[in-house]
Image (spheres, rainbow, N blue to C red):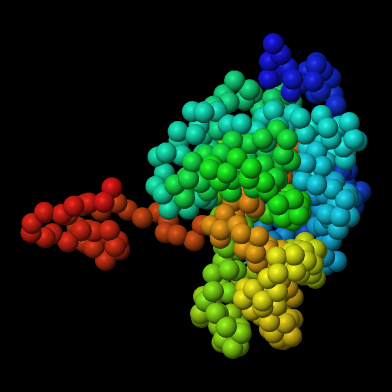
Amino acid sequence: MQSRKSSLLLEKDRKNIEKLYLDLVPKVPESKQTCKLTLPDGQTFELPILNGSDGPPMIDSRNLYAKTGYFTYDPGYTCTGSCVSQITFIDGEKGELLYRGYKIQELAKTCDFVDICYLLLYGELPSMQDKKNFDTTMKNEMLVHDGLISFYKGFQTGAHPMAIMVGVVGALSAFMNEDLDVKEAVQREISAIRLVAKMPMIAAIAYRTARGLPIVYPKKKLSYTANFLYMMFADPMDPDYAVDEYLAGVLDKILVLHADHEQNASTATVRIAGSSIANPFACVAAGIASLWGPAHGGANEAVLDMLDEIGDSSNIPECIKKAKDKNSGFRLMGFGHRVYKNYDPRAEIIRDVCHEVLDYLDMKNDPYFKIGLELEKVALSDPYFIERKLYPNVDFYSGIVLNAIGIPKSMFTVIFALARSIGWITQWREMISEPVLRIGRPRQLYVGHINRNVNDRTERENSYDTLSVLTDPPKKGFSIYKP
Ligand code: ACO
């Protein structure tokens, strides 16, 4: 019997594969220009300038501290490059997004998610035969270990599926510890394929567990995306349950649009976790945690919460006023982007999809859709949003589409994680393949006390009661603690 490992290797020897992957390792370009830095004491230093194939040039500050004794300060890494990469490119000014050099608009029209996985992982679009083989490999790896399924039993019904995802994806490494030598190209590929192939089942069980529903297993005859929908929605009492193909195609497009987005918060998290040579499944679990927040992947869920709160178009002016008030702590969810200062090209694609899906489902009167369109119109004509170049991002529409096709709100960010798993693992693999890998270790500008003397405990003032909400005032009688 052929082992799973050898079927994944497609009988190529390891050395061949190592060689094959050399092209996928990005190289730091040679510097042809320098710039001068003058320090307060008048000393000047030359710093190399690096030019990529596109995008702004970068000042190479790798030796800055060694040469000058200075660090740079850039919270949120708004203008700091942390890697060289050849996977995804965004031109925020033009509103352009490329995967491996191909425009997202063209990919979204002509490719499915499995094509995109292949493109990101291997650098090229698959031929007919490649696609067939890759599809088979992915399907062979779809099932999760039965032992992993018992993990889900520990979660409470009603738990947020993203909480389950963080735990279960991290636990995957405990079930695949035999192929986890990240220094070997072959094992990196095996980990990558296993992660992406298993994500639909992991995500679908997270949903069914949270709902108290029995698990449904994937079917080989279904596509990657149809399998996910099947495992989520199949009725165990209906053996003829079939996934709506058009809606599976819509979800597949959403996966294509979310597959990668260069060095965003969750991808940077995966890279930083991986820089310590941690195993890839743990790194991706860290990425899922980062994605969960409403400023990032949690925005699609937050958009629907916001539309719920608005409730009626007549409340839009009040909502816009609140979003512009810095003291309110409220932002218009699904608006704005760190990089896109023109339009998010993914938002343009999904806005058209949104109109088509609602037509298909006879839901043109969907309140989310109606309030969403009205909110978009008002915000886009308001000077506050115009001046700050705040446009609707992909999540503004993805929430409305996902809701229309029947996906529960708590699964929106899980679907984002499912799509982004290919981006995370490709970025992780690119980083780990580099000949010199440096652990991610930012610096800080320390503004705290220095050189304090430790006084005697009896001389110190009581402060815990005022500093912490967790101090328990003494009381009579028994208390029951919730563990
Ligand atoms: N609503 C109201 N004001 C906003 C919004 C918003 N959604 N986004 C930014 N602003 C304002 C800021 O208050 C700031 O105003 P100021 O210059 O007067 O101080 C200005 O626009 C610039 O904002 P920053 O916070 O500097 O922008 P940053 O690049 O750090 O943040 C982010 C980008 C996090 C996406 C932000 O726009 C936001 O919070 N948006 C809402 C959440 C969201 O939709 N996230 C999804 C992002 S896309 C994705 O992850 C797939």
Foreground: 403 or 454? 403
Residue at 74%, 85% (x, y): give it.
381
Q: Is 324 on the left-hand or right-hand side of 150?
A: right
Most distant residue in the top direction: 1
Quadrant of res 404: bottom right
Foreground: 370 or 19? 370
Tell me residue 176's x, y (percent): 58, 26
Quadrant of res 451: bottom left
Which quadrant is the N terminus positioned in? Answer: top right
Tell me residue 385's x, y (percent): 70, 80
Tell me residue 335's x, y (percent): 67, 71
Check the image and report above or below for 378 versus 363. below
Q: Is 365 on the left-hand or right-hand side of 32?
A: left
Quadrant of res 175: top right
Check the image and report above or below for 67 versus 142. below
Residue 459 visible in the picture: yes
